[in-house]
Image (cartoon, grey):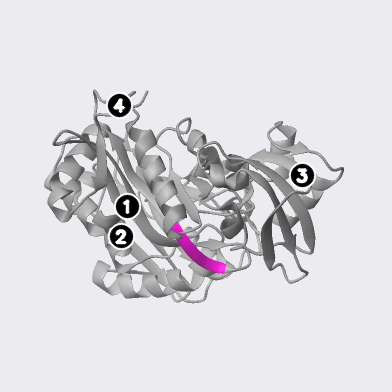
Amino acid sequence: MSDDNLTIRTLTTDDLSAFAELLASAFLTDPTEGLKHREELVFEPDRTHGVFDGDDLIGTGELLTREITVPGAGQTPLAAVTSVGVAPGHRRRGVLTRIMREQLHGLHENGGEPIAALWASEAIIYPRFGYGLATQFYRAKVRAKSAYRPGVELEAERVREVGREQAIPLIKAIYEKEAPQRVGALGRLESTWEFLLDDPEYRRHGATALKFAVLPDGYAIFRLKNDWNEEGPRGTLTVQELVATTPEAYATLYRYLLDYDLVFTLETFAALDEPLIHLLANPRAITRSAGDALWLRLVDVDRGLATRRYHGPVDLVFGVRDAFCPWNTGNWRLTAAADGNAEVKRVEDAADLELDVTDLGAIFLGGTRPSTLAAAGRIKERTAGAVARATAAFAADREPCCLESF
């Protein structure tokens, strides 16, 4: 249901306090100066929309200016959707729909980023606005001191723990080297780093401040939380981020963390194809539970599909449905040469595959296969072999990975 008495506009810096208070309320917490400070670090008021009931701010949604690594083409502009919230007592008034329409229609009309993405607080919400599940992750728990299999190669250089100020330039350099190589990874502005490394005590939940372990080719950011029982120490080490540009650095960093004194369990967020399990002598020393990560939306089908490279040559016509952004509805021919560079044009030809725009978002990074969606009845094959050709064309060398929530 839509309420015609509501108004929508972009925010200003004067709205920051109301913006932070609304988000705190929407996400079931209390407003604090710490929360306001975190929001201010990345606040882009001219890209943040507020819905008002009179003078009262009752809904928000923000677009952050970011980049994402896409298959074969490195980093490309991304509209990162965040800070979406509706005040309690104002649901079922069309607030979220207004925000989503203002964002996506505005990007289309102004020639903004061709791709939008978000992390979903509730996964059932965003498919109706065209977002498809593009990447997943798993939460892992590993028994500390777990042995590696024979033959794992480690760095000759020892891991060093360094202070925050010394660590930051080191880890930035390593991340900026690795991120353009990993599909799904996000580019980071200076403000992004400040947001990610903001470490007030209320965010630690009884654990230590962030710690930094570094090698020339990798780093780990982690916390420690002590615990004891009658059998001895039961501490937990939680990895916030581990990035390595070589297999040896990766194995060495995890070896260092697994051997930490007084730690009983290591917890980490990991990509679906995380190598850690293949380092362990006993793969059952690690337990995993999967979750959804990045939800991706093509703002404009033609511009979005052309940003990445394909395992070409390929020639397919996609019959696309898009109820929320009707300019995308129709048949689109994707052609790619042997080098993977693509051209996308609207055509009158019959579709080889019929699908919703959510399904295009899901397969875009290569993490969700067209064959999987076809098996689920989401993609309809109209030309024999088209699903197999699309699955091969959209494939990525590794699982796309976005572990950075924004």
Q: Earlier in the sequence, mark 4 or mark 2?
A: 4
Residue type for callout 2: Lys
Return the disc, 1 or 3, that comes first in the chain's sequence: 1
Q: Is residue 17 left or right of residue 289?
A: left
Res 3 label? 4
Query: Alpha-carbon distance for marks 1 and 3?
Result: 52 Å
Tag 3, which secondary structure? Answer: loop
The answer to whether 181 is drawn above or below residue 400 in the figure is below
Q: Let me know if residue 2 is in the magenta part.
A: no
Exactly how many numbered labels are in the figure?
4
- State the mark number for residue 351: 3
Where residue 236 appears, x then y in whole percent? 36, 45
Q: Which residue is mark 1?
A: 223
Q: Main secondary structure of the magenta part?
A: strand
**Front: mark 4 or 2:** 4
Q: In terms of sequence position, does the residue under pointer 3 or pointer 4 come before the other?
A: 4
Query: Pointer 2 and pointer 1: residues touching (CB < 8 Å)?
Result: yes
Q: CA distance from mark 2 to mark 3?
A: 53 Å
Q: Position of residue 90 (x, y in %)?
A: 26, 25
Label 4–label 2 contact, CB within 8 A: no
Q: What amino acid is found at the position of numbered circle 3 in the picture?
A: Ala
Give the mark nearer the N terminus: 2 vs 3. Answer: 2
Q: Measuring 53% from the left and 54% from the top, which residue is drawn there? A: 401
Residue 291 versus residue 296 in the image, above or below: above
Q: Nearer the viewer, mark 2 or mark 3?
A: 3
Residue occupied by mark 2: 211
